[in-house]
Image (spheres, rainbow, N blue to C red):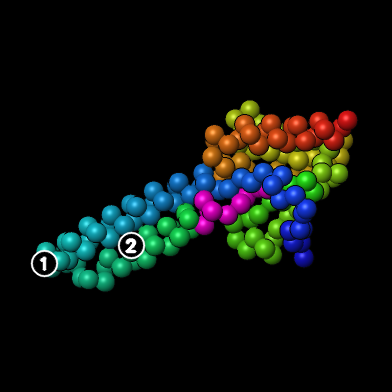
Amino acid sequence: MAAPKKIAEPHKELRFTRAGQAQGFIVIAAVSFAFFLLIGLTWFMGHPTFTWWMALPFLILSVLLAKLSAYCARHAYIILTPLGIEIFPLIRPRKHLNLIYWAQIIDAVFDDELTTLKLHFNEDQSAGIVLSLRAIPTKKLPLLKRALESRLAEKER
């Protein structure tokens, strides 16, 4: 089972969270909460077709989405460390952590819109990993690109 390694210099880590996804989840949570309020107020005003429990699914959904949004904004998606790149999935990140050492990476290719990253493990570019970068805020993507390119250029020297 892969697990994060203890490193001597944690201040050299570069951490990217899923804050881009968090924005979408918090908007959906707000809309769900608005539906909860709308149905709750309609019931409170005495509308005959609404009962008190009809608003509860929207409240539960909004609470769950708000918690998911906080989780995405707080926890890492990609961490660049002196050892390599740690990739954390959204579900069960401790169990499914993927650590890619710098020695494994031959090339890193970003698409034009900075929405995907391809890490190649051989010269033929037939083995590697494709990562979606849509979870990372767009303002942070140039930093990720510059950090990866400079680290790979440093490795080539």
Rendered image quadrant of residue 48: bottom left
Residue 44 spot, x, y in % from top left: 15, 66
In the image, 24: left or right of 116? Answer: left
Q: Residues within 10 Å of mark 2 (few under 14, many from 20)?
A: many
Residue 98 spot, x, y in % from top left: 73, 55
The amino acid at mark 1 is: Gly
Q: Is residue 126 above or below residue 4?
A: above
* In front of the other: 111 or 30: 30
- Disc on res. 46: 1
Q: Is residue 149 above or below residue 95?
A: above
* Range of magenta residues: 71-79
At horizontal 31% and vertical 68% (from top left) the residue drawn is: 56
Residue 102 spot, x, y in % from top left: 82, 44
Answer yes or no: is residue 84 visible.
no
At horizontal 58% and vertical 48% (from top left) the residue drawn is: 17
* In front of the other: 116 or 4: 4
Name which of mark 1 and mark 2 comes first in the sequence: 1
**Placement of the C terminus among the 4 image quadrants:** top right
Q: CA distance from mark 1 to mark 2?
A: 19 Å
Rendered image quadrant of residue 129: top right
- Disc on res. 58: 2
At mark 1, the secondary structure is loop
Q: Is residue 86 above or below residue 151?
A: below
Whether residue 74 appears in magenta in the rendering, the answer is yes
The amino acid at mark 2 is: Phe
